[in-house]
Image: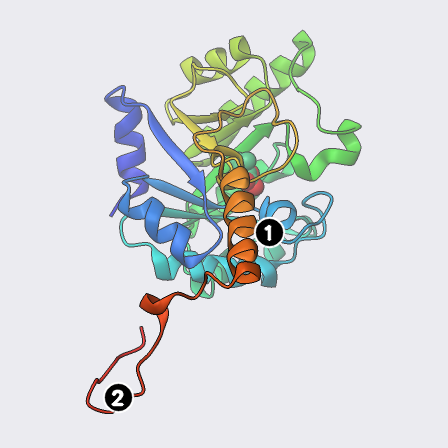
Amino acid sequence: MTTVLDVQRFKDEGRRFAMLTAYDYLSARILDESGIPILLVGDSLGMVMLGYPNTLPVTLDEMFHHARAVARGSRQALLVGDMPFMSYHVSTEQAIESAGRFMQEGRMHAVKLEGGGRVIEITRRLTEMGIPVMGHLGLTPQFVHQMGGFRVQGKSEAQADRILADATALEEAGAFSLVLEGVPSTLAGRVTTALHIPTIGIGAGPQTDGQVLVFHDFLGITSGKAPKFVKRYANLADDISRAAQQFADDVRKGTFPGPEHEYSANPAQREAVP
Ligand code: KIV
């Protein structure tokens, strides 16, 4: 099984690695068997699985529901649970309780928290208690209203210096890795060089140690124009739509089900389902 020590070794040995989000049993199983070393049960599930406009409405219980399904499907991957909005904001004690529940009830191996500032002290406390923490800086979706929308962060020198300082402080507090989202490639390169722990980029250019994509984005299930940083490795939205139309057509024409799909009434012919 991939551990946080393996993830550190990837960086030490200069091996780039992939992380993908996962939200359910079967897709987690496929990704795990494909050798993806880290699966993130992201709070992006609020948008791609539950249809919320952003990640803010997602609750811990919704996260646990999906986390347990992913854990049932996965054998090898390091499983990271994304702490949702307001599950670590009230106090350090609340953060410890939420993260502990993520490991006990959600069966995750680590948690991810967005932001610097007070999150640095929370990271220190969680790490001290044996709860591995993945940091997340740059475009942090839980700050959408403070950022005035989903905007690239770290473009000004002051912002870039802040992100670099937070990254260094998170590493010092014990974070085992750091997601850098929606920042200029040059800044991601600076942070990656400065840190000993691995960085994992999304919309952060090619210089990070790892890359992460959202499941629905990389498979082309999301509709409309994908953000610039997304590479679609399949076009499943089109495939699903074509298959649905074909199915409806077959039913209308009476060509499905065919003889090969029928059960016989002959008692001597024992048939199992499936
Ligand atoms: O929630 C999520 O999917 C994430 C990734 C985009 C890093 O935080």
Q: Which residue is drawn at 50% across and 16% down?
A: 188
Report the amino acid beneath label 2.
Asn
Picture quadrant where residue 267 is located: bottom left
Instruction: Please name whichever residue, 170 or 73, is drawn nearer the observer in this view of the structure.
Output: 73
Of 170 and 183, which appears nearest the observer?
183
Q: Is residue 227 left or right of residue 266?
A: right
Asked whether disc 2 touches disc 1, contact meaning CB atoms under 8 Å apart, the reply is no
Q: Where is residue 160 shown, x and y percent of the image? A: 62, 14
Q: Is residue 254 visible?
A: yes
Quarter, ligand 1: top right
Q: Residues within 10 Å of mark 2 (few under 14, many from 20)?
A: few
Residue annotated with mark 1: 49
Name which quarter of the figure residue 206 lies in. top left
Can you give x and y, in whole percent of width and height, for residue 189 in the image?
A: 46, 12
Find residue 112 and report its horizontal and vertical position in percent.
51, 43
Residue projecting furthest to the left: 268
Label 2 or label 1, whichever lies nearer to me, is 2
Report the number of discs: 2
Spatial separation of the CA atoms under disc 2 and disc 1: 44 Å
Amino acid type at circle 1 is Met
Q: Where is residue 88 in the image (x, y as percent from the top left)?
A: 63, 50
Q: Tag 1 or tag 2, which sits nearer the N-term? A: 1
Q: Mark 2 points at which residue?
A: 266
Residue at (43% x, 27% y) in the render:
211
Q: How crowded is mark 1: few (under 14 residues within 10 Å), some or many (20 or more)?
A: few
Between 139 and 176, the residue placed more toward the observer is 139
Q: Tell which residue pokes out farthest to the bottom in this image.
A: 267
Task: Give the answer, above or below, for where 10 lies relative to 205.
Answer: below
Q: Quadrant of the C terminus?
A: bottom left
Instruction: Describe the element under mark 2 as helix, strand or loop.
Output: loop
SS assignment at label 1 = loop
